[in-house]
Amino acid sequence: MKKTLFVTFLFLIIGSAGTFAEASTDPTFPCSLVLEPINKQDYNAKGVALLYKVKLTPSFPRTSLSIHALHLPDPTTLGNYDTYEGFAFIKNEISWRFKLYPTPEVDGPTWAGRFDDITSTMNDAVIQVRSSDSKTEKLGPPILSNRVNKCK
């Protein structure tokens, strides 16, 4: 009788563990996401976002978001902007922004940066590359964008 109860208890625990794992709405980490141009005239502009869990302090793990973007138009051609930023948001809830740094290359820079302190679930997040004015910290319109739910 005790063995039967024990085996039944084990099956219940194992069966419910699968249910709990499926209940998570975060994308499977790590995952990557291609960032596509908003303006079809910028057909050469592309980027990629990488999302994964990091544990950099004794506290709980956080989500790291990094962006690598290529062939972006010069930010000055988009208005009063001089740089690019990574921008992620969950509508009506929270947003994150971080600087993208250019690398010196012949045909224009590759822009890259990361942010390691995301504690929110990312299931409904949108990831973007946006022009920015470094002096006023004003963000411009998105250049590249995609939704985290398309993460692979």
Image: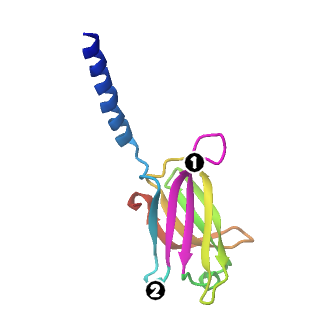
Does 61 lie within the magenta span? yes
Q: Nearer the viewer, mark 1 or mark 2?
A: 1
Total label count? 2
> Residue 75's x, y, as percent?
62, 81
Sequence-wise, the earlier of marks 1 and 2 is 2
Question: Residues in magenta?
Answer: 46-70
Q: Name the residue type under label 1.
A: Arg
In the image, 109 versus 133, the foreground residue is 109
Quadrant holding the N terminus: top left
Q: Position of residue 55 (x, y in %)?
A: 60, 47
Q: Residue at x 43, y 49 (%)?
A: 26
Quadrant into which the C terminus falls? bottom left
Question: Which label number is shown at residue 108?
Answer: none
- Residue 144 in the figure: left or right of residue 150: right
Asked if disc 1 and disc 2 are in contact, CB closer than 8 Å, the reply is no
Q: Which mark is residue 41?
A: 2
Tell me which residue sits at (63%, 89%) in the image: 106
Which of the two residues, 10 or 67, is positioned nearer the viewer here?
10
The residue lying furthest to the bottom in this view is: 106
Relative vertical location of residue 23 with respect to residue 73 in this rendering, above or below: above
The disc at residue 62 is: 1
Looking at the image, which residue sits at the far front? 3
Q: Position of residue 112 (x, y in %)?
A: 61, 71
